[in-house]
Image: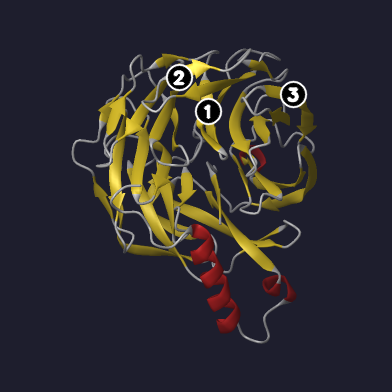
Amino acid sequence: MHYLSRVWSRGTVAGLVALVGAVAAPAVASAAQSHQSGFVYVNDNTAGANTVAGFSRQADGRLTPLTRSPFDAGGAGTGSGLASQGAIQVTSDGRYVIAADAGSNQISVLRIEHDGALKPVSHGVVSSGGTTPVSVAEHDGLVYVANAGAGGSNYTGFTLGSGGRLRPLAGSTVALPDDAQPGDVLFNSTGTNLIGARIGSSLIDSFSVGRDGRLTAAAGSPFAAQGAGPFGSEFRPTDSSQLFVSNAHGGTGNGTVSAFSVAADGALSSIGASPFADVQTAPCWVEITRDGEFLFTVNTGSGTISRYSIAVDGTLTLLGSTPVSGQAGVGAVDARLSTDGQTLYVDESRVATVGEFTVKGGQLSELGTVSLPSGAAAAGVATR
């Protein structure tokens, strides 16, 4: 898909990186380093100079801050929470991190070194093409950014070159009204569709993606959401035609998650009895297990993570809700699974920590937390 399709898959690159790292690592490497099984990155969204916190993931899922973390992103954060999902992403080839710099209307690209450290690429900080970028999507070198600020709200496309340099894609910008407040933009697994959730006006934009990377709106787009405040979104990893969207603004105990079938042209149609009750407050961030069997949504207002099973046709069944320790979950935001699917990491920005949860099927058990850097107003979690 697309003219910038990668020759190597993420798994191939990750495997080679791990091999090189193992060969290059000194014999005196610590036991923790020898059991490293991936990396986790958080957009700190710090006021002024923005940074990205980096962590080494151990075999049991626990996190250890990387040496020299946090890493300078190059742009500026806002110093306050972003109402969005996906403010930081690892590219599909596993080589780069792309972070939104919401305070300076920029996006940054950083190269992932063999030890997980981040290094800015040449010309790696560019204009987001609008104001207040809050969400980033990438597929095989095609990048779209959701800009949420008044006077410059839009979706804007870029191409990602082999050296990590972003270039604006001419004719790609889709303007949005000032009240749209887009909170999430994402591709399906094949890169043929892209959607964007408008939190402010409770609408969902849906597009087909051309071979040139430009967007064509589906007939009927934007579509009315099935609840107030459509927020987090995720395509099912095992079925690119199924889309799930949390509805955050239904009030106390009235959160829901919607399930849609997505046609080739991007048209959305409801699945079964959608939306499905969450029985919690403000379900905002959505993550689905790699096997497509279970969905988790972080309930920012009630301090819990709801767990659903997903039927073949996309119907959701609520399994229950797992509390986040203490009151850390009240205000918890973005969440992301490790690449092996065994651990869920939750950005508990209100208390400046990342929560670690072991995943077994549709069940979660909390391992513990790790602290974020001083001054972090974290937005977004990415894993590799």
- What number is the disc on residue 7? none
Which dot, 2 or 3, sits closer to the camera?
Answer: 2
Give me the C-alpha separation between circle 2 and circle 1: 9 Å
- What number is the disc on residue 268? 2
Circle 3 crowding by C-alpha within 10 Å: few under 14, some 14–19, many from 20 = some
Q: In terms of secondary structure, where does tag 1 sit? A: strand
Residue situated in front as seen by the camera: 10 or 108: 10
**If you read the primary sequence from the N terminus, does the residue marked by circle 2 or circle 1 appear first?**
1
Q: Is residue 294 left or right of residue 267?
A: right
Three-letter code for the amino acid on which mark 1 is drawn: Leu
The coloring applied to the image is secondary structure
In which quadrant of the rendered view does residue 214 lie?
top left
- List the residue tagged with mark 1: 243
Q: Position of residue 90 (x, y in %)?
A: 48, 52
- List the residue tagged with mark 3: 318
Three-letter code for the amino acid on which mark 3 is drawn: Leu
**If you read the primary sequence from the N terminus, does the residue marked by circle 1 or circle 3 appear first?**
1
